[in-house]
Image (spheres, rainbow, N blue to C red):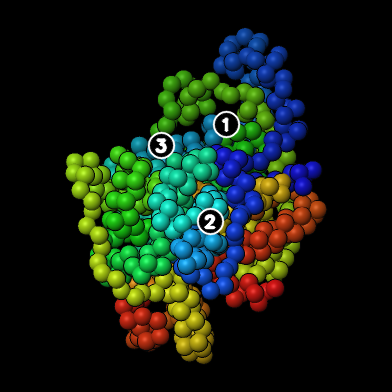
Amino acid sequence: MGTKNIYTDNNATTMVAPEVVEEMQPFFSDLYGNPSSMHLFGGQVKKFIDRAREQAASLINADPSEIVFTSCGTESDNAAIRGVLSAHPDKKHIITTRVEHPAVKNVCQYLSKNGYRVTELSVDSRGQIDMDELTEKMDKDTVLVSIMWANNETGVIFPVDDIAKIVKSRGAVFHCDAVQATGKVSIDMNKTPVDLLSISGHKFHAPKGIGALYIRKGTHFVPFIMGGHQEEGRRAGTENVPYIVGFGRACEIALKHLSIENIRVKTLRDRLEKELVEKAIEASVNGDTQNRLPNTTNISFKYIEGESILMLLSEAGIAASSGSACTSGSLEPSHVLRAMGVPFTRVHGSVRFSLSRYNTEDDVDCIIEKMLHIEKQLREISPFGREELYAAQ
Amino acid sequence: MWDYTEKVKDHFLNPRNAGEMKDPDAVGEAGSLACGDQMKLMLRIDKNEIITDAKFQTFGCGSAVASASALTEMIIGKPLAEAEKITNRDIADYLGGLPEKKMHCSVLGHAALDAAVNKYRGRDSAAPEEKKKHVLCECFGVTEEEILHVIKENGLTKIEDVTNYTKAGGGCMSCHEKISALIKSVVTTEKPSPEAGPAGKKLTNLQKIKLIEETFEKEIKPMLKADGGDIELIDVEGSKVVVSLRGMCSSCSTSNFTLKKYIEPKLKEFVSDDLFIEEV
């Protein structure tokens, strides 16, 4: 192998689109002005920032004035949560879920030790929350509900419309981490009453280091980063002009591809998933397959371990990720799969393939072939599930 | 990606002596499914107590497979008495080192060897009840004895080191104080730790899991399935059997009754008397 590398770890990060790189180039050379400056150099770049803001707003059907550029999705999440809490100092209850990204989960855990009451909603085996539990847990002290649009590990999409309606009807603020959903599914701020929405550029072919926070008009918000008057006083710091321009272009391309390309990606994902599960010795899909991002599949291979799988996939030129303990950097297996009650025998052998519009039918064929071979290879040295292995041979 | 040495990669990609052995003279197991690694070591020992062959099976990460592979290479051809002296540090050194956070993989290899030798010599490291009492890290099921052992063997001085070597303390962290006390006890007194209880016959983890799964298939699932339900084994931690109910059972109001009055007695009957059941 080694002739061609196949990248299916797009929920971790994506390739920067060539059109985006091209768009950014001039802002590293001629167009280096500070958009706040009163002279020609500043004025030249200001209009490109305005255009990027319009492109970003179009992707989620918002008003450009509601878009604030940030340095990444994590900053957007921090700014949203802290910004809302600071604006409502009298209320001390936050609701979130057990399956949030660390950018929300760890912030909430910190707050729970610093004067806030935090409720983490549980999820069922499909990874879905119980709407009645959400309703029950909301009280007069609830200031903020922070729930993701789609889960990074399983791709499971929450019923954000319904959540938003419940939260709004009870007078709390709703923040939604849409880092994984943006550019993959349709997001319409005119239809969904989300108050704040986090977006990250590098998840949809913009570079790392650029994100956005949507703040609905009329939302009480105290800036997280204070200083100059940039971003209408909502996020201080000189604008990262090249990245903002690239981000805008990536939003524009994502919007263009939203319907057609995502159907193609979904078809690829569905075939990959179906064939792997059918042909493997023992494999199953994690998460609600009815409500899911079009690009993500999380498959557990029983009795084999994720890091071993990833190392062998990597040897075969295939990039994916896993929820196993050994790949997490810490020693704990995926908090998402554990919250769903996925047995240890399956958590440790979970592999996430996340596709993008750059993947092909050939990629899928190759992954299926290599992955099935790897499963067999690791099962042969595993002390578990010997009978099933012999039965499959 | 972890920063593995070329030797670790080689042993992982081309594992030596992987597979099964017919009628081994000694078998040792270590680890658990819950922790994400389990190793089974099988030894052929001749009448002069020389290890003439070794085979392993490992469920685990790259360095766990490599540690097992290296261990077999290190012990084949060695007298048992000499193999017994191999430490986890020796295994790691043989591989040109392991990342700190992966040292527990070498400990796993050592523990499997230890278990195999003990079994061969007719010693059992600890009776199940005795062992249960000394579990210090509930998250990963690590005993006080295991922690003391690595602290001494590797001269560990920090909680973080203990976590890297055994996983203990890597979960809820509530045992950190106890680990700290253990480290202190080793530093202040060089007295060896009290060895755990007398020999007692017990099922190995693997045997236990296998038996439980058999019991589920033969005794329990047919009954549940008749009512549109199902059950799945999630984990076995000592005597605790963690299960998840599926299908109709998951929403059934009497499911707890089913667990305690029907499923648990079956497990006690067919597997082991000390088992108790819990739902996730």
Q: What mark, if any, has residue B77 been given in the picture?
A: 2
Q: Give the residue displayed 46% in from the left and 20% down from the top.
A: A228
Foreground: disc 3 or disc 2: 2
Q: Quadrant of the N terminus of chain B?
A: top right
Q: Amino acid at mark 2?
A: Gly
Residue at mark 1: chain: A
Residue bearing the label numbered 1 = A209
Q: Which residue shows up at 42% across the image and 44% down it?
A: B89
Report if residue B41 is visible in the image: no
Q: Which image quadrant is residue A62 in?
A: top right
| Mark nearer the N terminus (3 vs 1) | 3
Choose between A302 and A229: the one closer to the eye. A302
Residue linked to disc 3? A83
Give the position of the C terminus of chain B as an image quadrant: bottom left
**What crowding class fits label 2: few (fewer than 14 Cα within 10 Å), some (14-19), or many (20 or more)?**
some
Q: Does dot 2 land on a helix, a strand or a loop? A: loop
